[in-house]
Image (cartoon, grey):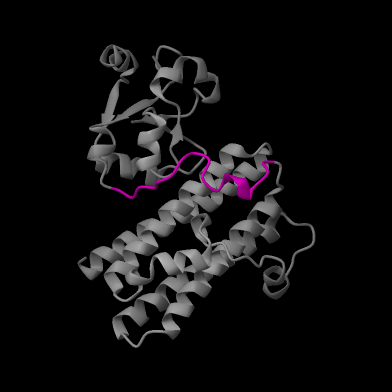
Amino acid sequence: MLTARGFKHVYNVKGGIQAWQGAVAEGPVELNLDMVRGDETPQEIIKIGYGMEQTLADFYRTVIAGTSDEQLNTLLGRLASIEDKHKKYLLELYNSIEAFPVDQEAFESDTTTTVLEGGFNLHDFMKKNEKYLHSAPSLLELSMMLEAQALDLYLRFADKMENEETKGALYKIGNEEKAHLEALGRLRESMGS
Amino acid sequence: MFDNLKKFFTPAESLDSDQTKAFLGEHEEGTFTLLDVRQPGEYEQEHIPGAKLIPITHLPESLDELDPEKPVVVY
């Protein structure tokens, strides 16, 4: 049908979702879509993304403060530093399109939120997932779940946007999330979990 | 009836899980469509991140939501 209607390249995922061995997201199409209106500028959407990255980095650092497990601490430090790199990317993306570039401090004062990547409320998330915060393998699984939800949310945001430039910014953020998810997958393999 | 419909929509080429992962990794977001043609309840339970949901029964009247110039990966 798709090819008959002019779609040039159509690929079927053999075996469907049952055969898929990569990351998955869950929830309905509308999940957390009320975080955006649909008419945001690229700058506004980058700020929303930055706030969620910041909250996730803070989350990892909060967990670090509460543990003495060395392997867990090392992993948490790595995860927090990945979020910091992602924040840096978002700030650079913002400044590449903003007529009046801002420094990190000014940017952060304008992007405060308690929403984690993927759209989760920080306090609810910590309460619900406390049991996964005490070992490196389970924390890594949790982190990968967050990244998969984040990728999914950014791309659903993109679908809702009216402005093509805002969609473009979200696709760039999505590419970052995708690379991040792949990096976590490699980290999991290296940990043998 | 569903099987007949499904056959009608079957695309030409298949990708296994690894090939699909490679495709998604190699292509930038916005340059392709990842299409989930299952029912909303199935999508809600789990889906490949970034998939656009258009149940197969609604696909004929929703084709204008998709860009025919972009590759489509469908499941």
- Residue A60 pos. (x, y %): 45, 74
From which residue to which does the magenta span run?
A: A22-38
By secondary structure, the bulk of the magenta-drawn segment is best described as loop
The verdict on residue B13 being magenta is: no
Q: Residue at x 49, y 72 (%)?
A: A59
Q: Residue at x 45, y 19 (%)?
A: B58
* B2 to A36, vertically: above or below: above
Q: Nearer the viewer, residue A104 or A115?
A: A115
Query: Taking the image as drawn, is residue B63 in sight?
Result: yes
Q: Residue at x 47, y 44 (%)?
A: B28
Q: Nearer the viewer, residue A85 or B60?
A: B60
The verdict on residue A33 being magenta is: yes
- Residue A25 falls left or right of residue A91: left
Residue at the outermost right position: A100
- Residue A50 pos. (x, y %): 60, 62
- Residue A159 falls left or right of residue A27: right
* A105 to B18, vertically: above or below: below
Residue at the outermost left position: A192
* A102 to A39, vertically: above or below: below
Q: Nearer the viewer, residue A178 or A17?
A: A17
- Residue B59 pos. (x, y %): 45, 19
- Residue B3 falls left or right of residue B62: left
- Residue A125 pos. (x, y %): 46, 64
